[in-house]
Each structure stands twice: as structure tokens, then as C-alpha cells.
Image: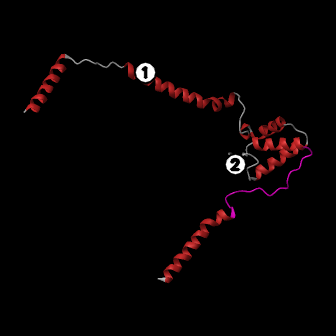
């Protein structure tokens, strides 16, 4: 019995190590090499940099901004942004440079233009279309002809059935 328990303990320990190994080492998450803190000449440059790395998306991670991403590309983009900011580039210049290289996808809030109208207005159009279809369906249902009165034959048959049930209840 003790031998069985020790084998089970060894098997569970090995299984835990095998399952936790890649996660513990971080094999599935690419990380950027640690970089030295970025220093700027003025506080305005530091603030501009912070705004930019929060507004621009990592094109590898897709749902993280550049400040949150550990991807090597994000580290390169942060370095490029810091160089541009130190060289005196304004916010729009940096954004234009990134958009020219990576497209509008690099922005968390894409601009409103002909190629993004569906992105901006699509959900509202779908919602309006759904409510319109529901309204039309309900309107048509209400307008359907529903005979409220019974035909004379149906009326006579109903009376006959009602009379039968009354006679059975009396007996």
C-alpha cells in the first residue's frame, strides 16, 4: 500500500512539473530584452512619449498598447518613438510615421475615413436594421386578418358541444 502511495505521489509530482514547466519558464510568451529607462530632456517630451505608447497598439499582441506589451517589436517601436520624440517630433508626426509603416491598425482608435466607415457605423446600422425587422414583423402580425366571429355552422357545433357537457354534468 505504501509503495502504491509513493508511486502515485511521484507520478503527480512529475505530472505537475511537466504541466507547469513551460509556463514557469515562460516558453510561450516572447519577451523583449530589458531596456534601460528612457530619459528625456524635458518633461513635455516624457509626457508626449507616455501618451504615444499608450495610444498606439502593438501589432503583434493586437490587444495591448505599446507600454503593456513585452513583444520584441513593441520594444523596437518604443525605442523608435523615444528617438523621434527626443528629435522634436510632435505627436501627429509620430502617429503618421507609425501609420505609414503599419497601417491604421496601429491606432487603438482608427480615424474616420472611407475605409473605416463600416467599423464606425456598422454596429449602429446592424442594431437599427434588427429593430426595423422586428418592428415590421410585429406590424405584419398585428395586421393579419383574424376572424373574430364564428361561422353559423361553427356556432351551432359549439352550442351542441356545450350542451353535451352541461347534460353530462347534470347526470
Instruction: Report the residue at 77% width, 56% height from top.
Output: 32
Q: Position of residue 68 (x, y in %)?
A: 73, 49
Identify the image quadrant of residue 46: top right
Question: Where residue 165 is drawn, which disc sits there?
Answer: none
Which secondary structure, mark 2? Answer: loop
Instruction: For label 1, count other residues whose C-alpha is less than 10 Å away and answer few (under 14), some (14-19) or many (20+).
Output: few
Q: The C terminus appears in which quarter of the rendering?
A: top left
Farthest-out residue, bottom: 2
Q: Position of residue 115 (x, y in %)?
A: 68, 30
Q: Earlier in the sequence, mark 1 or mark 2?
A: 2
Residue 139 is left or right of residue 129, and the answer is left
Query: Marks 1/2: CA distance?
Result: 47 Å
Q: Is 41 a magenta residue?
A: yes
Q: Who is closer to the viewer here, 151 or 126?
A: 151
Q: Is 150 a magenta residue?
A: no
Dominant secondary-structure state across the stretch colored magenta: loop
What are the residue bounds of the magenta stretch? 25-42
Q: Position of residue 81 (x, y in %)?
A: 83, 44
Amino acid at each position: 500500500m505504501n509503495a502504491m502511495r509513493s508511486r502515485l505521489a511521484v507520478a503527480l509530482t512529475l505530472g505537475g512539473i511537466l504541466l507547469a514547466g513551460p509556463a514557469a519558464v515562460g516558453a510561450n510568451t516572447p519577451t523583449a530584452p530589458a531596456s534601460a529607462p528612457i530619459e528625456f530632456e524635458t518633461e513635455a517630451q516624457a509626457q508626449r512619449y507616455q501618451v504615444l505608447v499608450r495610444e498606439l497598439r502593438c501589432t503583434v499582441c493586437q490587444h495591448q498598447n505599446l507600454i503593456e506589451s513585452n513583444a520584441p517589436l513593441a520594444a523596437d517601436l518604443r525605442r523608435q518613438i523615444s528617438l523621434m520624440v527626443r528629435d522634436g517630433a510632435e505627436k501627429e508626426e509620430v502617429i503618421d510615421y507609425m501609420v505609414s509603416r503599419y497601417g491604421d491598425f496601429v491606432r487603438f482608435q482608427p480615424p474616420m475615413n472611407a475605409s473605416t466607415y463600416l467599423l464606425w457605423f456598422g454596429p449602429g446600422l446592424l442594431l437599427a436594421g434588427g429593430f426595423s425587422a422586428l418592428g415590421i414583423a410585429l406590424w405584419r402580425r398585428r395586421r393579419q386578418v383574424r376572424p373574430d366571429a364564428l361561422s353559423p355552422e361553427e356556432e351551432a357545433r359549439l352550442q351542441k358541444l356545450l350542451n353535451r357537457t352541461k347534460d353530462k354534468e347534470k347526470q
